[in-house]
Image (cartoon, rainbow, N blue to C red):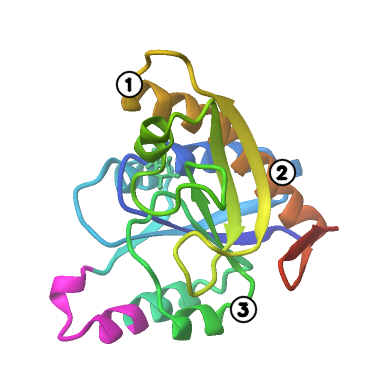
C-alpha cells in the first residue's frame, strides 16, 4: 500500500521537490497527498502546484490565537489522512495537541547533527562554533526544539573558510538524500518508536 505524506513547508521547498520526484516511482511506496504552508507566495507552494498536488495555507495572523491556528493546521492535515507528516523547512513549532493527534507520525528535518545546534540557525551556529563536521538530522517531532528521537543523520564536513550559505547548501544536498531514503524506508517498512530509539522495519 502506498503511504500518504503531507508535507509542511515555509520556503524554497527543495526537500519537498526531492520527495515529489522520488514519489514518481511507484516502487518508492509513498505519495505526497498535500502540501501545507504557513505563508503564501513561496516557491514550495509553486512546486506543489506544478506537480498537481493539493495545497493549503494557514497564516498565524489570520487566527485570533496561536492555538486556533494550530488546530486549523492540524484539521487541514488530518483531512488528508496522512500516514506520515513531513516538516520540510517548516518554520513554525506545532503544539502538543497537534502532535498528540498524529502520534509518532510527524518528522522534521534539521540542518545540524542533533543534539548539537538546535534552533533556527543550525549551519551558522556550527560554523561559529568551529565545528569540523556538521550535517542534518531527521527526527520524530516532540514538544521541544529539534529534540525528538532521531530517525536518521547525515554528516557533512565543514570546509575551511566557507560561508554559511555554501555550508547550508552542502548540508541541504546531503539532507535531501537522507530525507528521501529514510522516508521511503519508513513508508515501505513501517517504524517503531521506543523512548529515544527509532527502528525502521
Ligand atoms: C532545510 O535545510 C531545513 O532543514 C531547514 O530549512 C531548509 C529548508 O530548505 N529547516 P528547503 O525549503 O527544503 O529548500
Which element is circle 1 on? loop
Q: Which residue is mark 1?
A: 163
Instruction: Decide: is 20 above or below 85.
Output: above
The circle drawn on residue 111 is none
Q: Is residue 70 magenta?
A: yes
Which callout, 1 or 3, points at the residue further toward the start of the chain? 3
Quadrant position of the C terminus in the picture = bottom right
Q: Nearer the viewer, mark 1 or mark 2?
A: 1
Region in magenta: 59-71
Which callout, 1 or 2, points at the residue further toward the start of the chain? 2
Q: Residue at point 47% right, 24% down?
A: 170
**Real-space CA distance between mark 3 and mark 2, rounded to the nearest whole angstrom:** 23 Å
Which element is circle 3 on? loop
Q: Residues within 10 Å of mark 2 (few under 14, many from 20)?
A: some
Q: Which residue is mark 3?
A: 103
> Are dots 1 and 3 in contact, CB under 8 Å?
no
Which image quadrant shows ligand 1?
top left
Q: Residues within 10 Å of mark 3 (few under 14, many from 20)?
A: some
Q: Nearer the viewer, residue 76 or 186?
A: 186
Q: Nearer the viewer, residue 116 or 104?
A: 116
Quadrant position of the N terminus in the picture = bottom right
> Are dots 1 and 2 in contact, CB under 8 Å?
no
Q: Residue at point 78% right, 54% down?
A: 188
Q: Residue at point 61% right, 78% down?
A: 103
Amino acid at each position: 500500500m502506498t503511504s500518504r505524506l503531507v508535507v509542511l513547508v515555509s520556503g524554497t521547498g527543495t526537500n519537498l521537490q526531492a520527495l515529489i520526484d522520488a514519489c514518481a516511482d511507484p516502487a518508492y511506496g509513498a505519495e505526497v497527498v498535500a502540501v501545507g504552508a504557513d505563508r503564501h507566495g513561496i516557491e514550495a507552494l509553486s512546486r506543489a502546484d506544478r506537480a498537481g498536488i493539493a495545497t493549503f495555507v494557514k497564516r498565524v495572523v489570520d487566527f485570533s490565537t496561536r492555538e486556533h491556528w494550530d488546530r486549523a493546521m492540524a484539521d487541514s492535515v488530518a483531512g488528508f489522512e496522512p500516514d506520515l507528516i513531513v516538516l520540510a523547512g517548516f518554520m513554525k513549532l506545532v503544539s502538543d495537541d497537534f502532535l498528540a493527534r498524529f502520534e509518532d507520525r510527524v518528522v522534521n528535518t534539521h540542518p545540524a547533527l542533533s543534539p548539537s545546534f538546535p534552533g533556527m540557525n543550525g549551519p551558522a551556529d556550527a560554523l561559529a562554533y568551529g565545528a569540523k563536521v556538521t550535517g542534518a538530522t531527521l527526527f520524530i517531532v516532540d514538544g521541544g526544539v529539534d529534540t525528538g528521537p532521531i530517525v536518521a543523520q547525515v554528516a557533512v564536513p565543514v570546509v575551511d573558510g566557507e560561508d554559511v550559505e555554501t555550508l547550508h547548501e552542502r548540508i541541504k544536498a546531503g539532507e535531501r538524500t537522507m530525507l528521501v531514503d529514510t522516508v521511503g524506508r519508513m513508508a515501505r517498512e513501517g517504524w517503531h518508536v521506543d523512548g529515544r530509539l527509532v527502528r525502521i522495519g
